[in-house]
Image (cartoon, rainbow, N blue to C red):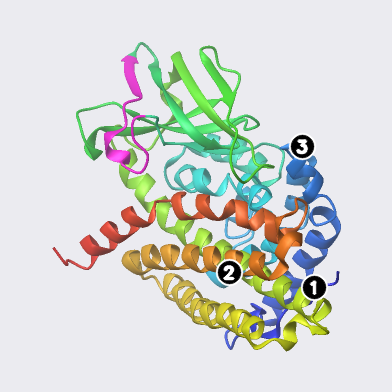
C-alpha cells in the first residue's frame, strides 16, 4: 500500500527552510527508501541490522550532520537535524534510528573535552561509519538519577581501575567505543567523571537484553571488572563529568521529541491511507465520521508540536538553552506518539496487530520513547526546577 506524505507534515514546508534543507531532505529520502525501508521488517525479526549501514549513512552525509569539518562532519543548523530525524522516521523503525544514532549521545563530550588525539583517531572514524560509539550511564541501581551512579574508578599507576555495571545501553553489543560515567570522588554529581573505554579491553564484558520494542537495536548490560583505563582516556576534568553529561542531554531530548513526532506522523498517514482503501458496510472507512475525526485528531495533536519543535530548534541556534521547554516538549511528543499509535492501530484493526508493518513496530516502540532520555516524571521535575516553581 502506497502511503503518501501529508503536505502539512513535510518538514520542508516551513518559512525558515532553504534550498540546502530541501537538498538534504531529498538525499535522505532516497537513502531511507533504498537502504532502510525495504529491510526493516527483516531486521526487526533478526534483532540487528548490517554494520555496513553505518558506512552508507556516513556516505550520504547523515552521520556527520552538525559536527566539525576537520573531523569529517558537516556543520548545520538544528532544523537540518530535525529534517534528518523526520526522514529516518519514515521507515517506522525506532530500533534502526536508536542504534544508528547512538554515537550522537556520546560524541559531543568527546568534542568538548577530549584530546586532539581522541578526536582524530576515534571521532573521525565514528563520523565515517567505520566505528560505532555508545554512551554508558544508566545503572541497575538507578535509571534517571545520574548523580547517584555507583560504578567506580579508582586511581592506580598510569590511570584508573574501573568496576561496576551499566544497563539498557543502546549499541551495547556492537559498539567499538564506550563513553562511561563513573564515580571518582564523593557522593552526588560533583564526584562523577567520564572515561572512554574500548570493547576489547581486559575485564570488560557485555550481555544482550531482550526488549518489548526497538528489536533491531541491540541493547546490552555492561560489566567492568578491574578494567584499566589510561589517564589519556579520561574525558574532561576529574569529577567534571556530570556537567558534560547534562549538557549532552538537551540535544538527546530534542532529538527524541522530533523522533516521537516523526513516528506519530507515520501513524496518521498510515491510518489515512488504510481508511481510504478499506471498505466496511458498503463504504470506505474514511466515509465514516468517527474514523475521519480520529485521523483529524491525530493531525490536530501533531501540528502544534511541529511548530513548537521548529521554534526550539531556532532558539537553540540563536544561543538559547530552553531546558525546561525541551524537557516538556520531549514528554509531549512521546504522548502524541502514544496516542497516534493507539488510534492508528485501532483504525487498521487486525492488520495493525500483525508484525511487519510500520504502525505495529511504532506501537511496540511507544513506551521506550516515554522512558528513554528521561522519563516523563523526571522531565516534569526538571522543568519545575528550571521554572523555579518550588
Question: Callout 2: helix, strand or loop?
Answer: helix
Q: Which mark is residue 221?
A: none
How far apart, in angstroms, are the residues tagged by discs 1 and 2? 16 Å
How far, Cα to Cα, is label 3 from label 1? 25 Å
Sequence-wise first label, 3 or 1: 1
Residue 340 - label: 2
The crowd level at tag 2 (other Cα within 10 Å; few <14, some 14-19, many 20+) is many
**Residue 280 % position (x, y):** 79, 78
Residue 278 visible to the viewer: yes
**At x 39% / y 29%, what residue is drawn?**
140
Binning the other alpha carbons within 10 Å of mark 3 as few (below 14), some (14 to 19) or many (20 upward) gives few
Name above or below for residue 270 compared with residue 202: below
Residue 92 seen from this side: no
The stretch drawn in magenta includes residue 146: yes
| Left or right side of 129 for 210 | left
The local secondary structure at tag 3 comes to helix
The numbered mark, 1 or 2, whose residue comes first in the sequence reads: 1
Q: Which numbered disc, 1 or 2, marks the residue closer to the eye?
A: 2
Q: Which mark is residue 46?
A: 3
Question: Is residue 192 shown left or right of residue 207?
Answer: left
Q: Nearer the viewer, residue 301 or 233?
A: 301
The mark that comes first in sequence, 3 or 2, is 3
User: What quarter of the picture does the N terminus occupy?
Assistant: bottom right
Q: Which residue of the protein is positioned furthest toward the left in this rendering?
A: 390
What quarter of the picture does the C terminus occupy? bottom left
Q: Is residue 147 above or below residue 68?
A: above
- Closest to the observer: 45 or 52? 45
Q: What mark, if any, has residue 3 been given in the picture?
A: 1
- Residue 282, position in %: x, y? 83, 84
In front of the other: label 3 or label 2? 2
Range of residues picked out in magenta: 141-155
Amino acid at each position: 500500500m502506497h502511503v503518501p506524505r501529508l503536505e502539512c507534515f513535510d518538514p520542508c514546508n516551513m518559512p525558515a527552510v532553504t534550498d540546502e534543507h530541501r537538498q538534504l531532505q531529498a538525499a535522505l529520502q532516497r537513502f531511507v527508501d533504498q537502504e532502510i525501508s525495504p529491510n526493516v521488517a527483516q531486521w526487526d525479526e533478526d534483532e540487528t541490522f548490517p554494520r555496513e549501514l553505518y558506512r552508507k549513512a556516513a556516505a550520504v552525509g547523515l552521520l556527520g550532520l552538525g559536527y566539525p569539518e576537520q573531523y569529517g562532519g558537516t556543520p548545520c543548523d538544528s532544523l537540518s537535524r530535525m529534517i534528518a530525524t523526520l526522514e529516518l522516521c519514515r521507515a517506522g523503525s525506532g530500533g534502526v534510528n536508536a542504534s544508528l544514532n547512538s554515537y550522537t549521545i556520546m560524541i559531543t563530550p568527546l568534542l568538548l573535552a577530549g584530546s586532539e588525539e581522541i578526536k582524530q583517531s576515534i571521532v573521525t572514524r565514528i563520523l565515517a561509519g567505520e566505528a560505532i560509539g555508545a554512551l554508558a550511564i544508566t545503572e541497575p541501581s538507578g535509571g534517571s538519577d545520574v548523580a547517584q551512579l555507583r560504578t567506580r574508578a579508582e586511581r592506580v599507576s598510569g590511570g584508573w581501575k574501573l568496576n561496576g555495571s551499566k544497563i539498557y545501553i543502546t549499541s551495547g553489543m556492537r559498539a567499538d567505543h564506550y563513553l562511561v560515567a563513573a564515580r571518582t570522588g564523593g557522593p552526588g554529581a560533583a564526584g562523577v567523571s567520564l572515561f572512554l573505554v574500548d570493547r576489547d579491553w581486559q575485564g570488560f564484558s557485555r550481555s544482550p537484553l531482550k526488549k518489548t520494542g526497538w528489536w533491531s537495536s541491540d541493547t546490552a548490560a555492561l560489566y567492568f571488572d578491574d578494567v584499566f583505563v589510561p589517564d589519556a582516556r579520561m574525558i574532561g576534568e576529574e569529577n567534571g563529568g556530570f556537567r558534560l553529561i547534562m549538557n549532552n542531554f538537551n540535544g538527546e531530548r530534542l532529538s527524541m521529541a522530533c523522533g516521537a513526532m516523526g513516528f506519530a506522523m507515520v501513524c496518521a498517514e498510515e491510518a489515512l491511507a488504510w481508511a481510504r482503501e478499506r471498505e466496511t458496510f458498503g463504504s470506505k472507512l474514511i466515509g465514516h465520521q468517527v474514523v475521519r475525526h480520529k485521523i483529524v485528531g491525530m493531525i490536530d495533536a501533531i501540528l502544534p508540536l511541529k511548530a513548537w519543535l521548529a521554534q526550539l530548534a531556532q532558539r537553540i541556534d540563536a544561543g538559547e538553552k530552553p531546558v525546561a521547554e525541551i524537557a516538556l516538549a520531549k514528554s509531549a511528543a512521546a504522548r502524541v506518539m502514544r496516542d497516534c499509535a493507539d488510534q492508528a492501530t485501532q483504525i487498521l484493526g487486525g492488520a495493525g496487530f500483525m508484525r511487519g508493518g510500520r504502525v505495529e513496530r511504532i506501537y511496540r516502540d511507544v513506551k521506550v520513547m516515554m522512558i528513554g532520555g528521561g522519563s516523563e516524571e523526571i522531565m516534569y521535575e526538571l522543568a519545575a526546577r528550571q521554572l523555579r516553581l518550588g
